[in-house]
Image: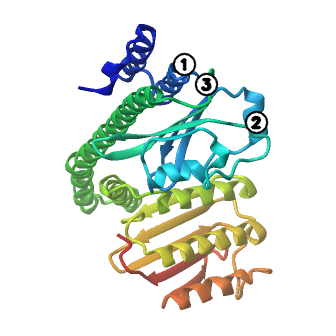
Amino acid sequence: MSPLHEIDDPARLRTLIAAVQAVGSDLDLPTVLRHIVESAVVLVDARYGALGVLDASGAGLSEFINVGMDPTEVAAIGHLPEGHGILGLLIVEPEPLRLAVLGDHPDSFGFPDHHPPMGSFLGVPIRVRGQVFGNLYLTDKQGADEFSEEDEILAVALAVAAGVAIEKSRLLDRVQELSLVADRERIAADLHDTVIQRLFATGLGLQGAVRAIDDAGAAARVQEAVDALDETIRQIRSTIFALQAPRAAGRGLRDEILTLVTEASASLGFEPGVRFDGLIDHGVDASTRVQLLAVLREALSNVVRHAGASTVTVSVEVTVHELLATVVDDGVGIGTGERPGGNGMASLRHRAEALGGTLELAAGADGRGTSVRWRVSIQSGR
C-alpha cells in the first residue's frame, strides 16, 4: 500500500487529488507544473517552491518554475538557476533530500545576489518508470524547524504527477512531430508523382510542337516556355529533397542562406532571387558549409559595394560530390579586371582552392553584370 494511506488530513488529500487531476486536463505543461508547485507549497506549508525540468543532456535545467517570490525579487536575482549547488546534487543523486538548515550542507552554494535567505529544505526527484525528468524543491517550512516525513511523502506524490505531466507533453510533441513527418512525406510524394509528371509531360508536348512551328520567333518563345518548365521541375525536386530529408538539430543550411540573403537585401535595396538544387541541408559537410556561407556573404558584399546592381540571383546546387554556388548581378560588370575595390575576390579564390575547387568570374554578354561561380568538391554531410 502507498505511504499516502498514512495521511489522514482530508484537506491535504483534496489538494493533492486536485493537483494530480490537473495532469489529465487540457492545460499546457507550464500551467500544470505551476499548479503542482503551488499545491506542493500549500501541502507542506513551505514559503517557497520550485520545479526544475532537466534539459536534453540531463546535466542542467531547461525550465525552472518558482512560487513564493514576487516579480521584483525574481527580477533582482536575474538569470534562473542552471542546476548547481544543492540543485545540482539532486540531479546527480536523484533521491529525496531533507535538510533542517540548507546552508549547512557542503553543496549549498551558488546563490546569486539578492536571493532571499532560505532555511529548511525538501527536494525530491521527478521521475517516471526510472527516468528522471527533474526535481521539485521546497524551502522554509512554516510552523516547524524542518520538513517532516509526511511532507516528503506528499512531495514525492506530487513529483510523480509532475513526471507524468512532462512525459505526457513530450509524447504529444513526438506524436505531432511524427504527424508532420508523415505530412511532409505525403506532400513530397504528391509533388513527385503528380506535379512533376504533369510538368514533364507538358514540356515534352511543347518540345514536339517547336519542331512543327515555322515561325522562328514563335518557336523561340515556346522553347523559352520549355526551359522555364525545366527550371520549375528542378526547383520542385529541390523542394522534395528538403521535405524528405530528416530534420537536423538546429537550423539547416538552406535557412542560413536565406537569412544571409535577407540581411543583404537591406543594403541592396531589393530582395535577391534564390535558387536551390539538390540536398542542400544534408549533402554538405560542416567545413564546406562554413566556407560557403563566408563566400556568399563576401560575394553579396561586393555587389553592394561595387556593382550598382538592380537584380541579383544566388544559386546553390549540390550533387553527390560537388557544390556550385553562383552569384549573378546586372551591375557595372568586371571589365578586364576586378571591379574597383573588389579585392574580396581573392578571398573567394583562396577559399575555393583550399577545398580543391575553383573560382570563375565572368562578365555579362553586353559587358554589364558579373557572374561569380564558386565550385568545390564535397563529402556527404549526412
* Amino acid residing under circle 1: Val
Which of the marked residues, 1 or 3, is nearer the chain's N terminus?
1
The crowding category of the residue bearing disc 2, from other C-alpha atoms within 10 Å (few below 14, some 14 to 19, many at least 20), is few
Is there CB contact under 8 Å for labels 2 and 1? Answer: no
Which of the marked residues, 2 or 1, is nearer the chain's N terminus?
1
| Residue for point 33% across, 52% down | 243
Q: In the depicted view, which residue is nearer to us: 65 or 29? A: 65
Q: Choose top left, top right, bottom left or bottom right for residue 340.
A: bottom right
Horizontal arrangement in the rendering, residue 182 relative to residue 112 (left or right): left
Residue 16 % position (x, y)? 41, 18
Residue 282 % position (x, y)? 38, 66
The crowding category of the residue bearing disc 1, from other C-alpha atoms within 10 Å (few below 14, some 14 to 19, many at least 20), is some
- Confirm whether residue 369 shows in the render: no
Q: Which residue is identified by label 3?
A: 144
Residue 75 numbered mark, or none: 2
Residue 42 numbered mark, or none: 1
Task: Give SS at disc 2.
Answer: helix
Judge whether 154 appears above or below 251 on screen: above
Report the colour scheme: rainbow
* Amino acid residing under circle 3: Ala
C-alpha separation, residue under disc 3 versus residue under disc 2: 29 Å
Judge whether 75 appears above or below 289 on screen: above
- Confirm whether residue 179 shows in the render: yes
